[in-house]
Image (cartoon, rainbow, N blue to C red):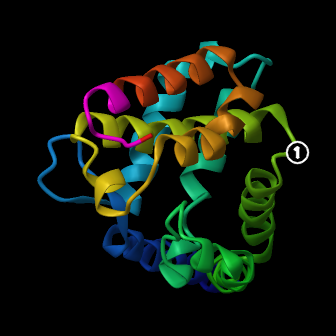
Amino acid sequence: MADDRFERQLRFILEVDQLKQVLRRNYLINGERRENSAEHSWHIVLAATILAEYSDEPVDLRHVLKMLAVHDIVEIDAGDTFAYDVAGNADKDTREQTAADRIFGLLPDDQRDELRALWDEFEALVSPEARFARAVDMLMPMLHNRYSGGRGWQENGVTSGQVLKRQIQIGAASGTLWEKAQAVVAEAVALGYLSK
């Protein structure tokens, strides 16, 4: 029994290595190449650690970090759905639910249930931790776009109105992060990185 548990855990660990191959639409800050989902996950875990003091509600940082570590695992099967892709977002939930069933299902039942619950909580935004995790998850691509010369926004015809409408969720977790998000959009417009 213990051997089967260990083998299932190893299978999951090996499977999630594939997240390194999932490319996102935004670029690294230096603009050299697109970021992959594993890099994004690492970066937001670190950002949440640094920015946790700006959550408007008290949060259990350990819980936030665990949630952020698993939130994009479904992209191994479902791909990274671009935030402003209307058609891609139409079936995103179905694709991601199917992916979550398969990927978390590789684990022993107790760990499957724990990680799946973290993923479900993040998706549903039902806790201060989930709202703060989502805020950081949304802020980081904005910063990448701003500091890579707006390349990802420009290549996809994204406007400042689209960014502000989508990113308003940041304000549900942190007034400070929302103010920064608005300032980033204003700077990007002023610099010509983002159209009105």
Given residues 48 and 189, the one toward you in this image is 189
Q: Is residue 40 visible?
A: yes
Given residues 16 and 6, the one toward you in this image is 16
Instruction: Sort mark 1 into few (<14), some (14-19) or many (20+) by Cα contacts within 10 Å.
Output: few
Which quarter of the figure has residue 169? Answer: top right
Q: Quadrant of the N terminus?
A: bottom right
Given residues 30 and 4, the one toward you in this image is 30
**Residue 171, horizontal then vertical, whole percent:** 70, 27
Q: Residue at 48% across / 70% down in the picture?
A: 80
- Is residue 154 positioned above or below 50 on the image? below
Q: Which residues are magenta?
A: 188-195
Given residues 41 and 138, the one toward you in this image is 138
Q: Residue at 55% across / 62% down in the picture?
A: 72
Q: Residue at 53% across / 84% down in the picture?
A: 77
Disc 1 designates what residue?
Answer: 126
Magenta: predominant secondary structure element? loop
Q: Secondary structure at mark 1?
A: loop
Q: Is residue 11 visible?
A: no
**In the picture provided, is 82 more to the left or to the right than 166?**
left
- Is residue 175 positioned above or below 71 on the image? above
**In the picture provided, is 185 more to the left or to the right than 162?**
left
**Residue 74, horizontal then vertical, whole percent:** 59, 73
At label 1, which amino acid type do we have? Answer: Val
- Magenta highlight on residue 130: no
**In the picture provided, is 98 more to the left or to the right than 12?**
right
- Is residue 112 positioned above or below 61 on the image? below
**Residue 15, horizontal then vertical, whole percent:** 46, 80
